[in-house]
Amino acid sequence: MNRYIFIFIPLLPILILSWTICLDPGHGGSDPGATGTYYDEKDANLDVANAARIYMVQVPTITNVGMTRESDVYVSLEDRVNYANSNNFDRFISIHHNAYNATVQGTETYCYTYGSANSFALRDSTHPELVKGQRQLITMFFITLICLLYLVRLLS
């Protein structure tokens, strides 16, 4: 019997620290969400979810990453909830992008009001990383834009 104790004790930290996550790229199919000149919210949501999934599957403590949709299809709110609940995910992350206008901008990160302290901790640790990532993307965009303008000028 003592042998079994030694076999299972090393597994306990992995089981305690493991997470399963459901990514929900909002909108899709016939529901474009916010629409832009060149890019719809449904596409941005799916792109972000795919990038997040690529990252998350590399994290040792995340044992399963599911997605409510993996292509441009419409999934009802009820089907999204049923998928997440039937797979017993520890966390549900719904991804959306707001339309930009001159008065409202920025990043929002919400969690369930009546959730556990872990939900609030996840929100509070995730939000600054999202903002940092946005700043890096904006910097990369402007560097790319400057390079393109330079090439256009050089080739003209």
Image (cartoon, rainbow, N blue to C red):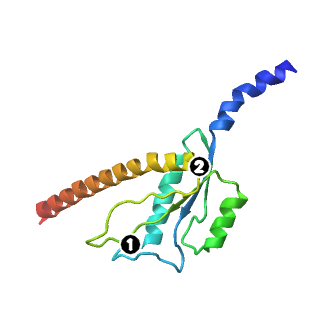
Check the picture and name the quadrant holding the N terminus. Answer: top right
Quarter-of-image position of residue 97: bottom left
Q: Secondary structure at mark 1?
A: loop
Identify the image quadrant of the C terminus.
bottom left
CB atoms of marks 2 and 1 within 8 Å? no
Q: Residues within 10 Å of mark 1 (few under 14, many from 20)?
A: few
Amino acid at pointer 1: Tyr
Image height check: is 113 above or below 33? above
Is 17 rendered above or below residue 131? above
Label ID, residue 39: 1
Q: Nearer the viewer, residue 138 or 132?
A: 132
Depth check, mark 2 against mark 1: the one in front is 2
Q: Nearer the viewer, residue 22 or 142?
A: 22
Q: Which residue has dot 2 on it? A: 116
Q: Earlier in the sequence, mark 2 or mark 1?
A: 1
Secondary structure at numbered mark 2: loop
In the orientation shown, which residue stands out farthest toward the right?
1
Whether 156 is drawn above or below 63: the answer is below
Q: Residue at x 70, y 26 (%)?
A: 10
Residue displayed at 71% across by 30% down: 11
Is residue 55 visible from the viewing direction of this image? no
